[in-house]
């Protein structure tokens, strides 16, 4: 598919000269909360994408995995519907190389990155999603190899109750209740949800439960925030990892989090301590009806404490922090493992030339009980040409230690390698941003030189066992272009947005026909979203996604949603894969054919 970007840009700029300007949800007021130094969105000097609560409403998506599919440079590789399992990747990285955070709490899993999206929240409780692309180790530590995604939850829902029921193709039946309450000295958000389906093909059924609680106590004096989640997923995993027709794979995962956070703040000083506990449990059966044939059970606990702070002086803002965590793994395949981690962070933001130039050098120093000390320096530089145009660049080192699966896993097709070295890379990026009240556009060019990347390689095409191996140096480069335009038709708001990403690496030059995971890079990606309203109570959204992978697979997927609102009642219809595209995002699992989901929501408030 050939995409004529100049034609599309000409159309958008023509509209911009004719349509009325409107005050859409202003990103200027959004403070990036995933860093130690609080920054308004327009002042950051990195490639950061914000998915706002308004974007979520207009996304024709019912879960975070489907939502992130619409972001340029983000590759969500799903294995079916309902968000049961999906791998999260940014800029050609692997599923172990992107860090997910919930309100700033690191949700990395020492067993495997396959479980990253197990922690994704229901969209009803999400205020926004911050997507930080490029090497982010100096900000977050290891695992932020190619980027990080921070899901920010809503602060409050006032006094309200929202009940949602959904049904559709594949006998999908979903229900949820979201409650918000404001008391004299506390506030609470509670969400309970259930998602079920008989599946769109053999052994693709699922039964998922979501529980979420966020409370703020002692609001009048020193507020303390509590966040608690529990996600239980049971699903048929047909062809997730094998193509044997006699297997009926099955998997159950449980993911939970409990965290306490508070913030002490003066005019110049802010300190934010936090403690948390995270658990992930994974049960996998190769034969669903015969657990004794092959069974894996892994339980991973992570207990952590961290303190992040910032100090504002005449020379700028200094950010610093420390976090420590202890990991315990119990597994019938990986063994019993323990790891202690400690991170120190330091950065300073200088503002020069009448605040037009910002320079932020920083470093993270990390200690692992099994991989010793490592340091990740980096620097961000930005120059504001005027109030609408900014150019920026950043460079930094990044790092990832092997997961326990990389080190110790063994089955009939895969062998871990306890002699693996950590992955490391040096990344560079330059870009520009143009932002007005109703129009924004950005362009970023990036390059990443990586060493010791971990892949599962077989020695020759005749071998059947893939061994975890540090492969040679790999260069990855690419570009990302995003633009969006907000305008009015009559008195109603409309949004047209599109993005394009190109990525190229030389990994195929080094392990053709021998790699198990690294041969499916998203080379060309094009996304378009048109959100419109032509009548008082009706909104409609159309999403188009084009993907071309290095394997040669190319596909086009159209999604759409219609939302009708009548006072406190909301009816929705979401159609996915409208034109019944036949495609695979990862492994051997074909994605669902055309399907529809009808929803009915009632808001009591």
Image (cartoon, helix red, strand yellow):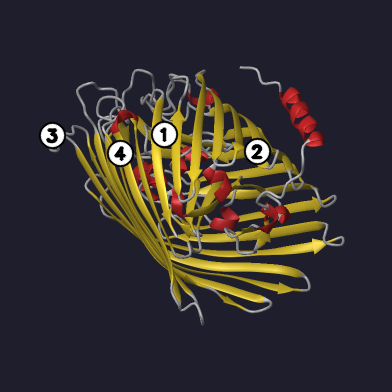
* Residue, disc 2: 495
Q: What element does badge 2 sit on?
A: strand
How far separated are the C-alphas under marks 4 and 3?
28 Å
Nearer the camera: disc 1 or disc 4: 4
Q: Quadrant of the C terminus?
A: bottom left
Nearer the camera: disc 2 or disc 1: 2
* Residue, disc 4: 173
Reading the chain from its start, which is encountered first: label 3 or label 1? Answer: 1
What residue sits 55% from the left and 35% below the top? 540
How far separated are the C-alphas under marks 2 and 1?
27 Å
Is 154 in front, or is 159?
Answer: 159
Question: Relative to residue 549, is residue 204 drawn left or right?
Answer: left
How far separated are the C-alphas under marks 3 and 1?
26 Å
* Residue, disc 3: 290
Is 327 in front, or is 580?
Answer: 580
How far separated are the C-alphas under marks 2 and 3?
52 Å
Reading the chain from its start, which is encountered first: label 2 or label 1? Answer: 1
Q: What element does badge 4 sit on?
A: strand
The reply to whether residue 320 is visible in this rendering is yes
Question: Relative to residue 352, is residue 232 drawn left or right?
Answer: left
* Residue, disc 1: 78
């Amino acid at each position: 598919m050939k995409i004529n970007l100049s034609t599309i840009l000409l159309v958008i700029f023509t509209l911009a000269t004719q349509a009325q300007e409107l005050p859409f949800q202003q990103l200027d007021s959004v403070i990036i909360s995933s860093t130690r130094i609080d920054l308004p969105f327009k002042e950051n000097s990195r490639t950061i994408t914000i998915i706002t609560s308004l974007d979520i409403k207009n996304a024709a998506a019912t879960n975070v995995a489907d939502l992130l599919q619409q972001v340029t440079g983000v590759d969500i590789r799903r294995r079916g519907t309902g968000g049961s399992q999906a791998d999260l990747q940014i800029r050609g990285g692997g599923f172990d190389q992107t860090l997910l955070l919930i309100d700033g709490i690191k949700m990395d899993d020492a067993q495997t990155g396959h479980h990253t999206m197990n922690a994704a929240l229901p969209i009803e409780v999400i205020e926004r999603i911050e997507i930080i692309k490029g090497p982010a180790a100096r900000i977050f530590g290891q695992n932020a190899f190619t980027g990080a995604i921070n899901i920010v939850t809503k602060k409050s829902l006032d006094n309200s109750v929202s009940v949602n029921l959904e049904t559709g193709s594949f006998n999908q039946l979903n229900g949820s209740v979201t409650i918000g309450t404001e008391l004299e000295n506390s506030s609470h958000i509670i969400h309970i949800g259930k998602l079920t389906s008989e599946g769109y093909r053999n052994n693709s059924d699922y039964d998922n439960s979501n529980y979420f609680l966020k409370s703020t106590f002692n609001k009048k004096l020193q507020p303390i925030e509590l966040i608690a989640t529990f996600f239980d997923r049971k699903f048929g995993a047909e062809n997730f990892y094998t193509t044997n027709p006699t297997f009926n794979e099955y998997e159950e995962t449980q993911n939970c989090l409990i965290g306490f956070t508070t913030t002490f703040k003066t005019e110049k000083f802010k300190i934010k301590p936090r403690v948390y506990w995270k658990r992930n449990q994974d049960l996998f059966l190769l034969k669903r009806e015969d657990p004794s044939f092959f069974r894996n059970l892994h339980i991973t606990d992570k207990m952590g404490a961290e303190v992040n702070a910032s100090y504002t002086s005449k020379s700028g803002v200094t950010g610093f922090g420390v976090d420590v965590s202890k990991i315990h793994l119990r597994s019938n395949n990986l063994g019993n493992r323990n790891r202690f981690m400690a991170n120190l962070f330091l950065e300073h933001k200088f503002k020069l030339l009448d605040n037009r130039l910002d320079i932020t050098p920083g470093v993270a120093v990390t200690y692992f009980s099994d991989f010793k000390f490592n340091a990740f320096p980096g620097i961000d530089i930005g120059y504001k040409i005027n109030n609408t145009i900014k150019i920026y660049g950043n460079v930094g080192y990044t790092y990832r230690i092997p997961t326990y699966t990389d080190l110790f896993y063994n089955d009939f097709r895969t062998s871990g390698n306890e002699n693996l070295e950590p992955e490391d890379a040096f990344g560079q990026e330059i870009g520009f941003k143009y932002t007005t009240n109703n129009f924004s556009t950005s362009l970023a060019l990036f390059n990443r030189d990586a060493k010791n990347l971990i892949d599962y390689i077989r020695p020759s095409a005749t071998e059947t066992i893939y061994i975890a191996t540090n492969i040679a140096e790999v260069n990855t480069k690419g570009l990302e272009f995003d633009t969006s335009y907000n305008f009015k038709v009559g008195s109603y708001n409309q949004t047209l947005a599109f993005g394009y990403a190109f990525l190229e690496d030389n990994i195929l030059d080094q392990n053709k026909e021998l790699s198990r995971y690294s041969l499916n890079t998203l080379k060309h990606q094009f996304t378009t979203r048109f959100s419109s309203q032509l009548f008082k109570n009706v909104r409609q959204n159309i999403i188009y996604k084009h993907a071309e992978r290095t394997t040669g697979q190319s596909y086009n997927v159209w999604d759409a949603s219609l939302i009708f609102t009548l006072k406190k009642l909301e009816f929705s219809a979401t159609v996915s894969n409208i034109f019944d595209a036949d495609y695979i995002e990862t492994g051997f699992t074909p994605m669902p054919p055309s399907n529809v989901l009808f929803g009915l929501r009632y808001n009591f408030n």
